[in-house]
Image: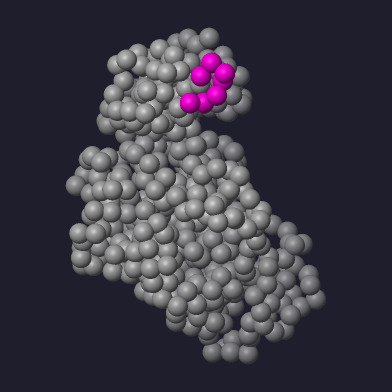
Amino acid sequence: MSRFVKIGELLPAKAITLVLLSEGGVRLLEKGERLDDRIFDVLREFDFKGVVVADSDEDAEAYIREKRHKKVPVSDLNVGDRISFKVRDESGTTIVPSGTKLKEADIDLLVNAGVHSVWTPLPEDDAQEARDGRLLLKLQQIKNSQRAGAIDIDTSEHEDDGAVSVEISEDRLVTDMAEITEQALDERVDAASEEELTERPDGPSLAGKIQTVDSSKIRALGSVKAMVHLHGDVVSNAEQAYAQVRKRQKVSGVLINALCTSVINGLLRDRNMTLNLSGLANSEHYVVRHAINTTLLTSNIAVQLGFSAHQVQEILFGAFLHDIGMMLMPSEITSKTEKLTPEEWIVMKTHPTKGLNALQGVTHLPRTTALVVYQEQERCDGSGYPRHRSRGLIHTYAKIVTVASVYDALTAKRPYRKAMLPYRAMETMLKMVNAGKLEAEPARALVHTLGLFPVGSWVRLEDRRVARVIAANGDKFTRPVVSVVINDDGKQLEKPQPINLAEKSNHAVNIAAPIPRPNRIEGDVRTIGF
């Protein structure tokens, strides 16, 4: 059962026992979440007179179905209509999955199965979509702080820190989803010159806005907490966006735009902390984790290459969604612990085209995102897939995202192999550059910002001390800034000791070898050494 309740009739609660929705059918709070003064403030800010209260998830979904979808007789369906919810036959077998864009054969299947009506989405209101995106973003930020206990983070020192707010211009967005089909993109690339697929920096570079953080000194606690909190917002927004993908729902481009803006502002505030956070397991879902980390790494590459704020935002949109097609792959393939069979590899190589299908459900989508999704598995020597494109026919943004994606994939543990140490992953990536598979310029940009001993990784010094790499030193690839965490007798230090190996006074201090993160170490792995 669901019912309307006025704002004035709601009472604060540490853990609500019902589901709260907007009158338009947007889920605001789930069972067990906190309803506090800040939530009330946001509801008033968005002119809520009341909310819909549902007794159960089933009641909530029933309300959403009635408000955001309509029941259509099968006889009134047209090719191209989208199905909201999966359709089963009399035996319970799914005959048309949720989110399907109907073809003539699908409609015939429904008729032959004796289905009388189906649910389809109501037409979208772009202004309402944008408003809902802003509302959900504000609510999510409050929920993050509730969970993290980080309500009182002091960010006063960053109130005027050069933060940017970026919106992708309307003329860069997809206006007709027919533009981003497999056939349309193939025709576009086949007819294009290398120049037409090349994007160069255009406008003021974001690099000039990066704040200088002295990594030879331990950061202020408030600054570290602020970065962790910002990263938490990115993770939460990513989980929300990919949950929409999994459920075959419309994916909010407003939400993704906000996520990308948060990534940019984190980079501007503290580049090395952003790089450190990119190497962490921040989600239980590999595709989501890979999307976040690839986006963080891509932001550093794009800024290093001199792109402007609007260009970086657009590149990050593609980075975040580059593997969206993997969400639609059979789990028996994506979770397989043995080597894939030739037949399974054929299926696996369809994920870029499945990604294009998934993009049909993303709002406020930049045109270049489709090319990134479609071409991220291509290689400069023509050995990639799905079209074996070579360097001149791969879009600039896809080449950039590919470098970030390859590096993150190598450092990630997968069902069929162990994770590589960051140092070994960097070596492997550079070998791919030398073999002509990856574009050299974005790879050099990643090495310049991440280092040969990547930021966030662990090393053993020649004197047996254990340290964490906390900053790269530009072209001094093997002489990063490290923070000693464990002394030479194996004991963890109460306070880390930063050392800039590029300084002459530290010429006698050398890295002996890269190592995995020590098992017995106390503290928050996100911030140790920083």
Left or right placement of residue 408 versus residue 64 in this view: right
Q: Is residue 381 above or below residue 519?
A: below
Which colour assignment does the render follow?
one colour
User: Residues in magenta?
Assistant: 89-95
Q: Quadrant of the C terminus?
A: bottom right
Q: Give me the residue at 54% from left, 40% from top.
A: 145
- The residue located at (41%, 76%) in the rendering is 436
Q: Is residue 62 magenta?
A: no
Residue furthest toward the front? Answer: 112
Residue 34 can be seen in this image:
yes
Asked whether, in this view, residue 134 is left or right of residue 478, the answer is left
- Give whichever of 165, 382 is nearer the camera: 382
Q: Nearer the viewer, residue 352 or 1?
A: 352
Query: In this picture, is 474 found above or below 24?
Result: below
Which residue sits at x=29%, y=28%? Answer: 79
Q: Residue 1 location, x and y as percent?
A: 53, 9
On the image, the x and y values in percent for residue 490 come to: 79, 72
Q: Which residue: 51% across, 65% down?
A: 407
**Displayed quadrant of residue 25:** top left
Q: Position of residue 519 (x, y in %)?
A: 75, 62
Q: Is residue 173 above or below residue 391?
A: above
